[in-house]
Image (cartoon, rainbow, N blue to C red):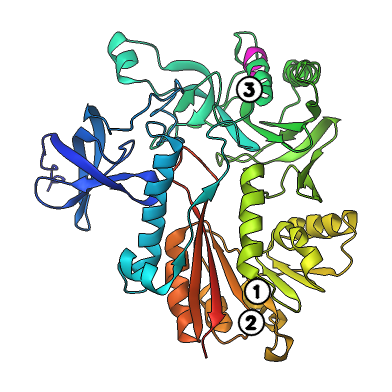
Amino acid sequence: MGRRRKKYTPPFEVDIEKLGKGGVGIGVAPDGKPVHVKFAPPGSRLRVAPQQRRKGKWTARRLEMLKPPTEAVQPPCGAFSLCGGCNLQELPLSVQRQHKLNYALGAVATPLGWTIDELKEHVRVHPIRGSEDAYHYRNKVEFSWGNRRILSQPEFDEGVPFQGRFLGFHAPGYFDRIADTDRCWLISEEANRLFEVLRQVSLHEEAPPVWDVRSHEGFWRHAMFREGFATGQLLIVLYTAPTSNPKEIDAVTKAAERLMATRLSEGKTLVGVVWCENDGVADVARGTVRETWGQDWIEERLGDTTFRLSIESFFQTSTKGAVILYDTIREALGDAPGPLYDLYCGIGSIGLYLASQFSQIVGIEEVPQAIRDANQNAASNDVSWASYHASKMETALEHLPSAAQKAALVVDPPRAGLHPKVAASLANTMGAPLVYVACHPPSLGRDAVILRQGGWQLTDLWAVDLFPQTGHIELVGRMIQST
């Protein structure tokens, strides 16, 4: 028997009412079911093409904006809707933030069994915070080379070729297409100047071929840009296939020399170019260092605390946003006494930023390289009272404080939230207080239910917008023992 053909559902019109996960717009389809649409700002009316109905909701593709939101603005980026990264550019920053706050509050309220209004009755919700910079705020970005690109509808209708040499971002929904762009509006002008040079040296017809993710052939694969906004230092990492070809070696050398010779604004310096070779087939920016021009790290500063960032170091992607976030964590901790337990500590940035407030810092993190960076950062900032442990949290529960310590707790877990064993253990841990930092609001809502079973009461919520133009939002929740 042949495969059953999908029933065709014609395009329909929908009013977008609110934001959902990832900044997706949500409305109601003609059959009364929710419909989720990318690049769909609340307040707009769209004509959409339904893609699939699953688990009681539709997903659909935007075809035409019939009525823009009353506050609509024109996106400045030429790759808008192609790259998929900045799906809220059609709204002013203040309007974006209000919609993102409503989404985040709903994501916490629902697991707790409350409406948003009921959440506000039980929890003090603070105004949303964020940097005033709507663009040019990212201190790290990864680009990809490819031999196929995604086209806009007008380009497709005109017969613009989609095969060639391209450098940009992965197009959403396509493993083999690049959203080719000559600039990114989220990085600085200096980083864009270097990106322009890299495009010139790597995309001309005599350069080595770009990577083909289908055949796993080619040379140029990925490029990572990292910038210290407070220090003015920039670093570029070039990821290629392994090679012994003199022409390919010469191409990387010339690219590095051109980049290092590029004039930047006063106070900005490209401190190094690192060449890494990736012998795997997975389409990720990783590899073994082959050669370095200059240095392979930069420094960044948050307040009075300086961090040394290697090419693999995790760090908050918005420097100004990180300061606002960490000041919010400080506010949530209040005048908490005793030691600070910094769980999922990464390179130690939260604990070190708050170090002057506490007599002891204990950090736990799964990634050994991050722990090495944390120890180095503690030493360079003369924070001798910090100690760090490389371990998965679920196997390091013995390091959690005893009831007699009256320790402050900060947890900054990955998007999936706390491991169930960790959540259950924290539920029965005494602390004063527990501050939960969530890059994925539903995880905070889910874990707050588990922690509530152990006597933890959610008292305050702060939303921090680290990533304008995108659907991402951070939440900081303060919890205290109610029993």
Badge 3, how many Cα within 10 Å: few under 14, some, many 20+?
some
Residue that carries the numbered disc 1 in the rendered image: 409
Q: Amino acid at mark 2?
A: Gly
Q: Are the residues flagged by discs 3 and 2 in contact, CB closer than 8 Å? A: no
In screen coordinates, is 250 left or right of 162? right
Secondary element type, mark 3: helix
Task: Give the image location of residue 233, x and y in percent.
Answer: 78, 33
Q: Earlier in the sequence, mark 3 or mark 1?
A: 3
Residue 117: which quarter of the image? bottom left
Query: With respect to residue 143, does 374 lie above or below?
Result: below
In the image, residue 161 lies in the stretch drawn in magenta:
no
Residue ID at (81%, 58%)? 372
Q: Are the residues flagged by discs 3 and 1 in contact, CB closer than 8 Å? A: no
Q: Nearer the viewer, residue 200 or 79?
A: 79
Residue that carries the numbered disc 3 in the rendered image: 192
Residue 343: which quarter of the image? bottom right
Q: Is residue 111 visible to the viewer in this orientation of the structure? A: no
Task: Give the image location of residue 16, x and y in percent.
Answer: 24, 42
Residue that carries the numbered disc 2 in the rendered image: 431
Q: Nearer the viewer, residue 38 or 70?
A: 70
